[in-house]
Amino acid sequence: MTLLPQIQSPADLRRLSPDQLPALAAEIRERIIDVVATNSGHLSSNLGVVELTLALHYLFNTPNDKIIWDTSNQTYTHKLVTGRQAQFHTLRQWGGVSGFAKREESPYDAFNAGHAGTGVSAAVGFVAARELSRDDHRVICVVGDGALTSGMTYEGLNQAGALQKDFLLILNDNEMSISKNVGAISSYLSRLLTSPLYTTLREDAKMILKAIPAVGESMLHAAKVAEESAKGLISPALLFEELGFLYVGPIDGQRFDHLLPTLENIKKLKGPVFLHVITKKGLGYEPAERDPVFFHSAPAFVRETGKPRHSSPLPSYTNIFTRTLIHLARENSKIVGITAAMPGGTGLSGVAEKFPDRVYDVGIAEQHAVTFAAGLAAEGYKPVVAMYATFLQRGFDQILHDVCIQNLPVAFCVDRAGIVAEDGTTHHGIFDLAFLRHIPNMVLMAPKDENELQHMIKTAVDYAGPIAVRYPRGSGMGVPLDPEPRPLKIGKGEVLRNGHDVTILALGSRVAPALEAAEQLGAEGISAGVVNARFVKPLDRDLICSIAARCKSLVTVEEHVLQGGFGSAVLELLAAEGLLSGLKVRCVGIGDEFPDQGPQALLRQHHGLDADGIARATRELLGAAPKTTQPQLAR
């Protein structure tokens, strides 16, 4: 008899015997593999954390006890045992179960998180709220080993240790070198160090030694040194104990006979506890065990082989970035690549293969990455910071304070700009124009296709100040590539099609659908021009003003929020030039909301960013069709 269908809540889970948990874990792995193979998703980490998740819900009184998941892309087992089994097949789909913790989805999801490093700080907030409310529930935070490269994690650890309130921090370690010491002895000692007998004896010994006149404190210090030395033989305890935590571990995170007794003992302890758990990425699916990096965020794949279900013959924008930077780095020894824990995703891993001494992965430390780049630039190098748009948000102050104020030549290659699909709300790169555009000295551009991207990367590398190029997730347009990248003239757009009724000013990924929309409108007797803006800052003042004076109707299109973006920049320019009077303008972009998860094409359609949406907005501006409410897609 299968167990998983019986588990509709943690209360059902707690009715099982400990001997039944391994069988349930095996069923959950099969379910996760099947759904991710169909839908895409984060596979490696979720397969590794099955037993730990079950143990937490088995022993703690969730949702009264709070589990905060740092990053939260490792919550698939958590979702399966907290009432979302029937909907789990909709994982990461439009209107379906989120791939991350989502408070709007379930009371068991205590805190939303898509960026690593936020978990400890949030959890300490939960601890403080509990103390202020005089409650007695437990607060547990699960962080991945990558979070220990985030400075924010240590800020949270520092406060948690100083508060000295009950708090369990669990390190899900599936990669770091400190995992080597897992084994029978360390697991046994971890259970021993958390046992009621040991902790009682330790506290009693402290009291007795302190009471001995003159020598008691010295003896207590010697005993502590001896204890820490013994721990140091089998675990990296000292750092976390100096921060005020009782360090426990490492223990085997795939063995219930290690997890359950250790967690039972920890429940009896007071103060902050740091539990170090070793898990194996991709456990239970051989292709993911062999290549956990690929299956970290896997596309839909054929379960039998692990090969992607779909592949495009066209190069991705990321691929073009990689090959262009390799080409330029051969010519310029001052080019240095920098990323924050995303060398594969950003394409810098390919650059590192050619130039291993000139690529730096600084870990989940975006703020450090930016200021590190500023230091390199101050010494005459040309740092290229490759980062997803959603993560670049975290380095805003450093971009302003450390790069732009000093007008340093740092190039930001902003990948995954715009709608990024199934990762959803926390990952859409739709705010970068707004937070970069208003900073003095910054130049900001976006390519219409992959050929223009290579020219923009060349432009960025050659430019003597701060500059950013944003480009979307996914495959290029399939256009021919010029044999050599060349620098573009800063602040100059490109007229792709002339029109006397209306002109569509399009940016980046929206240029191609703007051309399609112009074709539609042309078939209806509307003469629509199209401009590839190229630059958001500086705008092509002369081109835009001349078109506005002649055409009297403008539509701006961007895959970005409307507030503070490209359309806002155009309106500011027109207002400053006194051209708004008698001019009709419609800005097309994403409204004042956080877009949901779903396929890129569907989300672009939903937000009116496809060719049909652009054509519809243009007709409405011209009064060529009655203004109608955009149809809502079924959820």
Image: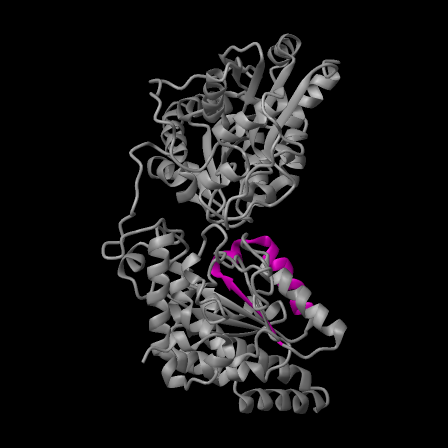
Q: Is residue 88 left or right of residue 214?
A: left
How far across and how far down the image is residue 279, in percent? 40, 67
- Image-based side of 212 in relation to 622, left or right: right
Q: Residue at x 59, y 90 (%)?
A: 200
Furthest toward the front, the residue is 626
Position of residue 329 measured from the top left corner of the image (x, y, whole percent): 40, 28
Q: Is residue 387 something one can see in this rendering? A: no
Q: Give the main secondary structure, helix, strand or loop, of the magenta stretch.
A: helix
The image shows residue 250, relative to residue 305, as above or below, that is below
Relative height, residue 32 to residue 530 (above, below): below
Taking depth in this image into account, of 257 and 377 the one nearest to the observer is 257
Q: Is residue 153 magenta?
A: yes
Query: Is residue 330 within the magenta segment?
Result: no
Query: What count of labels does the image hold?
Result: 0
Q: Which residue is located at x 45 percent, y 62 percent?
A: 87
Magenta residues span 138-162
Image quadrant of residue 134?
bottom right
41 vs 592: above or below: below
- Looking at the image, residue 290 sits to the left or right of residue 20; the answer is left
